Image (cartoon, grey):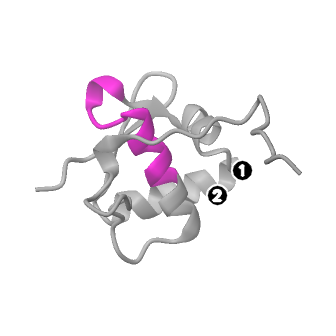
Amino acid sequence: MPPKAASPGRRISFSAGGLGACGMIHMPEGLSMYAEKVYNAMKNAGLDSEEKMANAERIVGLAKAPKNFVLRALDELQAKGLVKRKAREKAAGYYLLQKP
């Protein structure tokens, strides 16, 4: 039987920016499952500066997770100093902070 082909709607991509020497993504310790998912989604989307920040709705789409889980994850990431929240006119923006 021939090997199964990848379905046309599924894409697998890797970004060299977040990968370590062994190909693993460097994750901060002690994060919940959804916080890790949101952190990875933001990192892969390049939301790493105030100019590139996104609102919670966009992050929900990037993380493909329910809005309440994403909002809780953003609060957790803020508390750990990994994400910055910036109040704007209509909706707050979020971006990753650079770690020293």
Q: In terms of image quadrants, where is residue 7?
A: top right
Q: Residue furthest left?
A: 100
Q: From the image, which quarter does the C terminus lie in? A: bottom left
Element at label 1: loop
Residue at x-position 44% and y-position 22%: 89
- Looking at the magenta stretch, what is its main secondary structure? helix
Q: Quickly name the residue at label 1.
A: 66
Q: Tell me, for residue 69, which label it has, or none.
A: 2
Q: Is residue 37 left or right of residue 22?
A: right
Q: In terms of image quadrants, where is residue 59?
A: top right
Q: Is residue 71 left or right of residue 81?
A: right
x then y, percent, for residue 35: 50, 61
Q: Residue furthest front?
A: 1
Marks 2,1: beta carbons within 8 A: yes
Mark 1 surroundings: few (<14), some (14-19) or many (≥20) residues within 10 A: few
For badge 1, the amino acid type reads Pro
Q: Is residue 6 above or below residue 79?
A: above
Q: Is residue 40 above or below residue 79?
A: above
x then y, percent, for residue 26: 32, 62
> Which of the two residues, 45 or 94, is positioned nearer the viewer here?
45
Residue 48 counted in the magenta span: yes
Mark 2 surroundings: few (<14), some (14-19) or many (≥20) residues within 10 A: some
> Which of the two residues, 98 or 4, is positioned nearer the viewer here?
4
> Which of the two residues, 95 or 7, is positioned nearer the viewer here?
7
x then y, percent, for residue 20: 28, 58
Q: Which residues are magenta?
A: 38-52
